[in-house]
Image (cartoon, grey):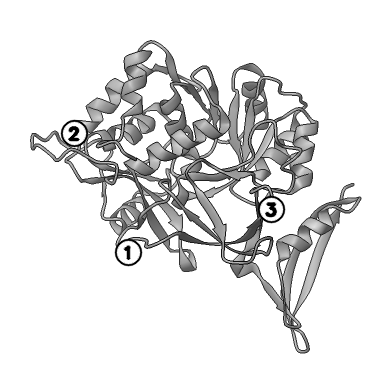
Amino acid sequence: MDDVTAPDWLARAAGNWPERTALRTATESWTFGDLDYAATEIGGRVPGGARVAFRAEMTAASVAAIFGIPRGGGVAVPIDPTLDTAQAAALADSFGAVLGWPPLPSHEEAEPEPTPASPAVIVATSGSEGRPRGVVLTRGNIEAAAAASQTHLGTRDSDVWLLVTPLHHVSGLAILWRAAHDGSQVIIQDGFSVQAVDGALKSAATWVSLVPTMLSRLLSGAEGPWPAVRGALIGGAHSSPELIAAANSAGLAALPTYGMTETTAQAATVRPGNAGAAAGTVGHPLPGVAVTTEGAPGEPATILIDGPTVSPGYVDEAPRVGPLVTSDIGYCDPTGRLVVVGRGDDVVVTGGENVHPAQVEAALLSRPGVAGAAAVGLPDPDWGERLVAVVCGAG
């Protein structure tokens, strides 16, 4: 970013549309003016530079904290609300944060003006052996991600986002940041319900972000079409081309997306209207995001990501140098779209050949009558590992 400071998009939206509805839950409705006021109140109680952890419940208060803590010069650390007090405190402590919700006492000290490089949020993600790592996302990361998403998807201030993914995950946070950037509304639903999601998509929402399991449940439990939906971002796990095709056939504009906490959510996404041409891919990289692989063109290899949306690193670890080296394997097709083959640590070496279970599963799922498939490697005295697949029928 070239700006000296990252813009406060919530404040801008409140200045432009103070009476416009910014947020709706099952029990309350907040305007941009309401949300901006609450964020300012919270920010005024946060010592500059403090890491403040809080249970990120699906409420307006949590949303105000997500915006307000960085506004006050602090770093927001949203915590899984299902953790008990001891677990939440231990996780916060591991990131050098104080479990400080309600907000900390007021302070009067003048703090340096934050810059795009200033940390804004720390998001917990699973590390090696399941130990959580704290991904640091800066003000610049968040602004670049929201701006790139708007350009890539063509979102606008009249849109309505349906938020069903947790606020302690980057997928949920990213929806809040995109909406504030655009001046659009967010509907928060606490937990996934087929009936509730179906109702929101048919009555108000124009955008939603779902994991493949949610999409599968929606298609099984509700009947389309959903003509007002401009796009349903499908990510967080591998989604088969068949599932995406089924969604589009049912009248839901399903857009496979690829990203992670370290890339502030999206790194590549199928653009609206390109589902057919992009089948089997996760689309083009977002503007300003460089996605490359370590292999020859068209050859599956480790995926590398660089650009202003990529986190500088993890709490208490050395800053990242060079592109982010992911754990995923893929390649870019001749059009520049990214194809994700699987995870590097999922490779099965059988008879000296590297086999990616995700490719085998995709091939099995393409066969008539196959509804589910899983491929794994089992020890074998002759082959080293033998690839074994389990399938289940469609009926």
How far from the left and from the top, in percent, is residue 219? 75, 35
Tell me where residue 229 appears, x and y as whole percent: 65, 24
Let me know if residue 35 appears in the view.
no
Is residue 303 found left or right of 29 in the rendered image? right
Disc 3 residue type (three-letter) = Asp
* Residue at disc 1, secondary structure: loop
Q: Position of residue 29 (x, y in %)?
A: 44, 17
Which residue is tagged 3?
A: 333
Q: Is disc 1 in contact with disc 2, using a CB cutoff of under 8 Å? A: no
| Residue at the limit of the structure toward the left, as seen here | 109
Task: Kindly identify the residue that appears in the image at 40 percent across and 18 percent down.
Answer: 30
The answer to whether the residue labelled 1 contacts the one labelled 3, judged by CB atoms less than 8 Å apart, is no
The residue most toward the bottom is 381
Q: Is residue 41 above or below residue 87?
A: above
Q: Residues within 10 Å of mark 2 (few under 14, many from 20)?
A: some
Residue 387 appears in the picture as rendered: yes
Q: Quadrant of the N terminus?
A: top left
Disc nearer the start of the sequence (1/3): 1
Give the residue at x 29% y 27%.
Answer: 39
Q: Position of residue 150 (x, y in %)?
A: 50, 31
Q: Amino acid at mark 2?
A: Arg
Which residue position holds label 1?
Answer: 317
Cβ atoms at labels 3 and 2 below 8 Å apart: no
- Image depth: mark 3 or mark 2 in front: 3
